[in-house]
Structure formats: C-alpha cells, structure tokens
C-alpha cells in the first residue's frame, strides 16, 4: 500500500524494520485521542437527550500467542536471525486492556482502547496516565466501569474513578451460578430453574437473599461445597455491583461485550493467525499501532516518529 501510494518500492524487510521504529516506546498517551477530539463525540451522543451520555470503561484480557526471547538466534547456514523452533516452548499470555466507549442507543461509539501484555499494576498505571492527562471529560458523561471479578483491577478503579458506577459483568457472574447449579443439581431442570431464579433475584437487587440462600444450601458433594463457597465469596465481594435491574433502568450496560469486541478486532484478528507466535515486545508494538488506528491517532504516531528522527 505504501509503495502504491508513494511510488517508492519498499521491501518487506524494510517495512518490518520501519514498523518497529514507529511503534517503539509508544505509550497509552501517544495513541490516545486528545480531549479536544473526544468532546465532539460526547456532544454528538448527548444531543437531544436530557441525561448525560454513558461512557463505559470496559476492562478485560485477551490471550496472545507468545514465544520467549530465548528463541532468538541464528540457524546454521542462514544469514538472517530466525526463531529456533525446535528449542523453544510457546506460551499463551494475557494481554490486559481497557476501552472507553460511548453508548448511543444500540450503537457503540469508540473513544479509546489500550490492550497490552501487562499485569494489573501496569494496567493501573496506564489508567492513571489517562486520568492525569485529563483526556476523559468526566464532568459531561456518566462514567460506568464494567469488569469481571479481578480484585486488583477493581482497586485501581476505586482509586481513580471513585464516583463511577461499577458493574460486575453479568455473564461472568452467571458462570459462577451455573457452576453451583451443575455441581449441586447436575444436568436437570431443577438446576436451570435455580439459576434463573437466582439471576432474577440479583436483577431485582436482592443480593442479600441470594447470599443467604447459598449459606442455607446443603451441599450434595465436595464439588458442590467448593462451588457454593466460591460463589458466596464472589458475590459477597461484589455485592454493590450486581443491582442489574437498577443499572438497566439507568441506561448502563450489564456486560463487557464492548470490551470483548475491541479485543477481537485489535488483538485476536491480528495476533492469532495460523502459526504465529510473537515476541512479547513485538506483540505490544503491534497492539499499540492497531490501537492508534482504531483511536484515530495513527497519523500523530507517525508524526511523532518523524519528529524523533529530526531531533536526533
């Protein structure tokens, strides 16, 4: 595409090198749109509505196929460096990320994505950078955070966005209930009835009744006892995030589908290709460039690279 647009022939090796140069050292603020670019999107969604629009912060992970740095090396008789396939073991690593998006009826308006091969602390630091830079116009939106049960992530959310509406992912919560039903009742109609009744109670804001019911259950096996205890702890830790009926009436999402969609188009489509195993640094660079493309900041990323070359 570059050769077609510019009329300059570029080899695949040169393009590979150039891509690494452009992506090297990119941070979340390098690929994030400016506040001035985000505010018109908020205003467009808010037009004609009496309530502030909902801005969703979704946080989730996506598994990325990686290879270790020890795989780097030369094969006998080859000039170029290649991975020694017979001497390394691949691994699937969790690329944790977040996405800010606006809800416009049935439509999602993308604002900012940032998935990387990072731990919870590094994800929190990236959120801190976004917060400190004032990129998100919190005063003109109703901020909502949707996440699963990872306590470390919720601690970052509570510290950075204490006034945001917190939502425990409905479908992740449902999985815990299904595990209890399967262990306690097996594959029976009673299991399905129990799950549906329990989800209805959560939807009506009766998490206390659900917790009490779990405590009164008589486990039929060791597996059932473990599933019930795990579910009780899970719901107790997130009891303020499960009032799904009230959340629905407020126009908030109940699931993290928007974040999972971003993971699909940014992470999975590009990185999970047949036979592809990425060095962690290379996968993060590619994810950063794809974020820049989706965030509408690819041009500013390229401009940044040109400025760095000029300064050097």
Image (spheres, helix red, strand yellow):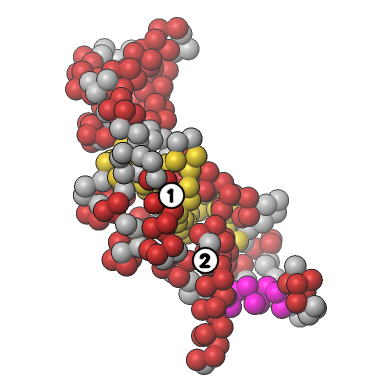
C-beta proximity under 8 Å, tags 2 and 1 = no
Mark 1, other Cα within 10 Å: few <14 / some 14–19 / many ≥20 = few
Question: Which residue is more in the foreground, 117 or 109?
Answer: 109
Mark 2, other Cα within 10 Å: few <14 / some 14–19 / many ≥20 = some
Q: Is residue 251 above or below residue 277?
A: above
Residue 40 on image: x %, y %: 42, 56
The residue under label 2 is 297
Residue 297 on image: x %, y %: 52, 66
Q: Is residue 28 above or below residue 191?
A: below
Residue in the picture at 57% in, 61% down:
293
On the image, which quarter does residue 170 sit in? top left
* Residue 150 visible from this viewpoint: no
Residue in the picture at 38% in, 33% down:
254
Describe residue 175's horizontal placement relative to residue 131 as left or right.
Answer: right
Start and end of the magenta stretch? 11-23
Query: Hey, which residue is sitting farthest top in the picture?
Result: 189
Magenta: main secondary structure equals helix
Residue 247 on image: x %, y %: 30, 31
Residue 194: numbered disc: none
On the image, which quarter does residue 150 sit in? top left
Q: Is residue 21 magenta-colored?
A: yes
Closer to the N terminus: mark 2 or mark 1?
1
Describe residue 212's horizontal placement relative to residue 249 as left or right.
Answer: left
On the image, which quarter does residue 77 sit in? bottom right
Question: Which residue is more in the foreground, 268 or 138?
Answer: 138
* Residue 170 visible from this viewpoint: yes
In terms of secondary structure, where does tag 2 sit?
loop
The residue under label 1 is 44
């Amino acid at each position: 595409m570059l050769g077609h647009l510019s009329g300059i022939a570029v080899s695949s090796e040169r393009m590979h090198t150039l891509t690494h140069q452009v992506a090297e050292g990119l941070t979340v603020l390098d690929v994030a749109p400016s506040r001035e670019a985000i505010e018109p999107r908020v205003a467009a969604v808010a037009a004609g509505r009496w309530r502030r629009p909902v801005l969703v912060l979704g946080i989730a992970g996506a598994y990325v196929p990686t290879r270790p740095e020890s795989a780097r090396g030369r094969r006998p008789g080859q000039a170029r460096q290649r991975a020694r396939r017979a001497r390394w073991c691949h691994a699937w690593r969790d690329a944790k990320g977040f996405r800010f998006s606006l809800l416009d009826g049935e439509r999602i308006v993308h604002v900012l994505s940032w998935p990387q091969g990072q731990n919870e602390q590094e994800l929190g630091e990236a959120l801190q950078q976004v917060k400190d830079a004032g990129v998100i116009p919190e005063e003109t939106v109703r901020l909502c955070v949707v996440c699963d049960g990872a306590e470390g992530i919720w601690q970052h959310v509570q510290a950075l966005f204490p006034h945001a509406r917190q939502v425990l992912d409905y479908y992740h919560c449902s999985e815990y209930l299904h595990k209890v039903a399967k262990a306690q009742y097996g594959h029976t109609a009673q299991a399905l009835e129990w799950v549906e009744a329990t989800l209805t109670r959560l939807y009506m804001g009766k998490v206390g009744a659900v917790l009490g019911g779990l405590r009164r259950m008589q486990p039929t096996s060791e597996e059932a006892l473990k599933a019930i205890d795990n579910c009780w702890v899970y719901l107790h830790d997130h009891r303020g995030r499960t009032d799904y009926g009230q959340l629905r009436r407020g126009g908030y999402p109940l699931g993290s589908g928007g974040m999972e969609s971003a993971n699909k188009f940014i992470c999975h489509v590009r990185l999970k290709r047949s036979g592809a195993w990425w060095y962690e640094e290379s996968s993060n660079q590619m994810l950063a460039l794809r974020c820049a493309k989706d965030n509408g900041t690819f041009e500013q990323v390229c401009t940044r690279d040109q400025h760095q070359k000029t300064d050097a």
